[in-house]
Image (cartoon, grey):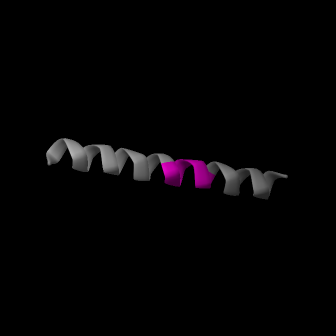
Amino acid sequence: VEYADTVSTVKDDGHAFRLGVKAQAGIEY
């Protein structure tokens, strides 16, 4: 269970990171 929760958290963090990069690119360009 702990391993699955960790993987889920990592995926959520990666998704948020990609959205942040897209938002940053939108502001810069």
Q: In this view, does 22 lie to the left or right of 12?
A: right
Q: In this view, does 10 lie to the left or right of 24?
A: left
Q: Position of residue 24 (x, y in %)?
A: 70, 53
At 80% from the left and 52% from the top, the residue drawn is: 28
Q: Is residue 17 magenta?
A: yes
Magenta residues (range): 15-20
Q: Is residue 4 above or below residue 27?
A: above
Q: Residue furthest left?
A: 1
Q: Nearer the viewer, residue 20 or 10?
A: 10
Q: Residue furthest right?
A: 29
At 53% from the left and 48% from the top, the residue drawn is: 17
At 33% from the left and 50% from the top, the residue drawn is: 9
Q: Where is residue 10 in the image (x, y as percent from the top left)?
A: 37, 45
At 14% from the left and 48% from the top, the residue drawn is: 1
Q: Position of residue 2 (x, y in %)?
A: 15, 46
Q: Which of 15 and 20 is in front in this view?
A: 15
Most frequent secondary structure within the magenta stretch: helix
Q: In this view, does 16 lie to the left or right of 11?
A: right
Q: Where is residue 5 in the image (x, y as percent from the top left)?
A: 23, 50
So how many labels did they put on this image?
0
Q: In this view, does 26 lie to the left or right of 12?
A: right
